[in-house]
Amino acid sequence: MPYVEVSKIIKSDKKKLYEIIKKMEDYPIFMKDVLSVEILEKGHDSTITYWVTNVDGRKIKWRELDQFNDEKCHITYKQLEGDLRKFEGEWILEESEEGIKVILTVDFDFGVPMIAPLLNPVLKKKVKQNSENMLESIKEKMEGVSA
């Protein structure tokens, strides 16, 4: 199963950055591949969200549990049901001298075992590219400039 981890330094207040990342329903505003995110349930430290994304012209949909640790500015997410066999990961925010290091992990399985050896490298590259674009979009939103 492919695993992707990307990171980026963002010059921002950690709590403000965390609040932007935590507000997933706003992702379609600044991320072209995310068509919609709907909050289905909202708890004290979690949400259940419904995602629709566009990956090379194909809509991928899933329902996801998002768990928030506000004290540590940490988010975990996990697909509950949807088009993928597995889709989960986390957002980690770490203080550094240059700013906040944002780490996004994605552990996924598209669930096509017979062609996985051929398909997984391509999908891993696409997920990595989308994850990097996501971090760049957040950086631009927080810093107000393109890096």
Image (cartoon, rainbow, N blue to C red):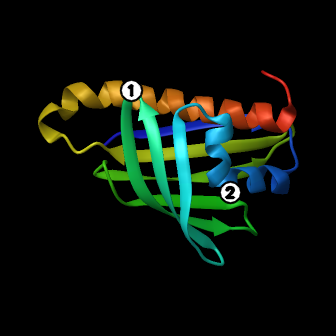
- Mark 1 sits on what residue? 57
**Mark 2, secondary structure of its residue:** helix
Find residue 105 and report its horizontal and vertical position in percent: 52, 45
- Give the side of residue 15 with respect to residue 87, left or right: right
Q: Which residue sits at x=84%, y=40%?
A: 99
Q: CA distance from mark 1 to mark 2?
A: 27 Å
Mark 2 nearby-residue class (10 Å; few <14, some 14–19, many ≥20): many
- Mark 2 sits on what residue? 22
Q: Which residue sits at x=54%, y=46%?
A: 36
Query: Going by the picture, which residue comes out furthest to the left?
Result: 114
- Give the side of residue 131 with respect to residue 143, left or right: left
**Location of residue 14 with respect to 128 vertically, above or below:** below
Q: Which residue sits at x=25%, y=28%?
A: 119
Picture quarter with the N terminus: top left
- In this rendering, does residue 92 appear at all? no
Q: What numbered label is drawn on residue 20?
A: none
Find residue 98 and report its horizontal and vertical position in percent: 85, 35
Q: Which of the 4 image quarters holds residue 60?
A: top left
- Give the side of residue 97 with respect to residue 106, left or right: right
Mark 1 vs 2: CB contact within 8 A: no
**Mark 1, secondary structure of its residue:** loop
**Location of residue 91 with respect to 60 vertically, above or below:** below
Q: Earlier in the sequence, mark 1 or mark 2?
A: 2
Mark 1 nearby-residue class (10 Å; few <14, some 14–19, many ≥20): few
**Location of residue 98 with respect to 83 vertically, above or below:** above
- Amino acid type, label 2: Lys
Q: Which of the 4 image quarters holds residue 56?
A: top left
- Amino acid type, label 1: Gly
